[in-house]
Amino acid sequence: MSRTVYDLIGLSAGVMFILALKGLSHPRTARRGNLLGALGAAVATFAVFFYAPEGSALPLNNLGWIVGAIAFGVVVGVPAARRVQMTAMPQLVALFNGVGGGAAALVAIVEYLKLGASASTGVVIATVFTVLVGCVSFSGSIITFLKLQELMTTRPVVFPGGRFLIAATLIGTVASSVWVVDSLGTTPLLVLAGLSLLFGVLFVLPVGGADVPIVISLLNAFTGLTVAAGGYVLDTTLLIIAGTLVGASGTILTRLMAEAMGRSLFGTLFGAFTAKPQEAGAATESRPVKSGTPDDVAILLNYARRVVIVPGFGLAVAQAQHTVRELADLLTAKGIDVAYGIHPVAGRMPGHMNVLLAEANVPYEQLSEMDEVNPTFPQTDVALIIGANDVVNPAAKTTPGCPIYGMPILDVSQAGNVIFLKRSMRPGFAGIENELLFDSKTTLLFGDAKASLTKVVSALKVL
């Protein structure tokens, strides 16, 4: 295969990636877009096996290792993707993102060692960028995975002098980058990789659990830029196109998410260092709450004119999306206006709730974004909150210094009645108390969300 044909195939794959992103912009075309992107990746990978670079007798060296690596990836990746629960999808995204960044960094290191002193200044600079950002993306993504999986604390991890250690590590990383460009040696490159890995860890540790989705999006943009720079190092146009697409879309998404959370990106990443310590409130056990039964909830819903359902991570954990759809259909059949209030970061990643509800064939037209549904809460008789906490917590407006302060929330407190479906009085992912739980118009229905909703549906059918 000639270089011209190879480049044309790469360009075709790049066009598929662009069309895939366009398809992902709407639920009706998302599946087609995803398949188109996968086809583009398959075509690009397949073409490599038939292209022999100038001066090479064979298209690929070490063919056995390459095929073995692909087979290993298929054996591990396909079952992992098919079996992963929707609740664990953010963790899987974080891992895939980290692997992409780490792979790009390793490829850049190998190519640098291969070229040696013959590498041009432009290639060396691109290599330095790829190694630095790729290693940051890899180690930072691992920390986001540990936080989301709750293998480590979801609270911001800060320690005395932490900001100075982060600054010193960043300065060391920049200095080692200059060292690599100036010395063209293996040792400075390995030092750069080590410091970049350390910086990635320190970069993510101060981020609280509620802000982790923003960091995942940012690291995804980092990985895209890494791949684009790796494309320059390898002289591969397709990698430049794909990496630029991921970097640009990830940057836009990060900006939109930060705006949705009502804070600056700098405040998201380093706000824990300046946050004011919160006073300890009264123990939850000593404060009365109003709990109810499925029959009580059914009666409230039956006599409502408008109900807004607010899904959260607890709904995903209980896999209650199909029961929620059944409940909504039953209410609609009774002439009750039903809508779903979706916060931009409901669950633990953008679009998490939309995908979850799509599994249950919930009509897309019933999904209302935060800005659309908030003005309707004063005319809403019942706000039914299923497993959500932080996205409806009034502390975001009333408690300066708390981890979610400044984040726009769903104003469920303005509804006539508020029903919380919760397993326990445990705080949400951000780790802070929700005063709305103790409001006189709030009714708590304790238990597994799916089991509780099933009982509510049964009670509604006989009313």
Image (tube, helix red, strand yellow):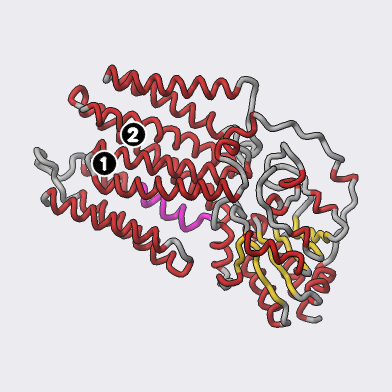
Magenta region includes residue 76: yes
Q: Position of residue 344 (x, y in %)?
A: 59, 55
Provide the residue designation for mark 2. Answer: 106
For marks 1 and 2 on the same chain, the one whose residue lies earlier in the sequence: 1
Which residue is situated farthest in the front direction here? 375
- Tell how many labels: 2
Q: Position of residue 109 (x, y in %)?
A: 30, 30
Dividing the picture into quarters, in which one does residue 117 lie? Answer: top left
Region of the chain picked out in magenta, as a range = 71-84
Query: For this view, does 326 lie left or right of residue 134?
Result: right
The relative height of residue 321 versus residue 240 in the rendered view (above or below) is below
**Image quarter in which the C terminus is found:** bottom right
The relative height of residue 62 versus residue 31 in the rendered view (above or below) is above
Provide the residue designation for mark 1. Answer: 65
Residue 9 appearing in the image: yes
Residue drawn at 15 percent across, 45 percent down: 59
Q: Position of residue 253 (x, y in %)?
A: 49, 50
Magenta region includes residue 30: no
- Determine which of the numbered discs, if any, sits on residue 139 in the image: none
Q: Main secondary structure of the magenta part?
A: helix
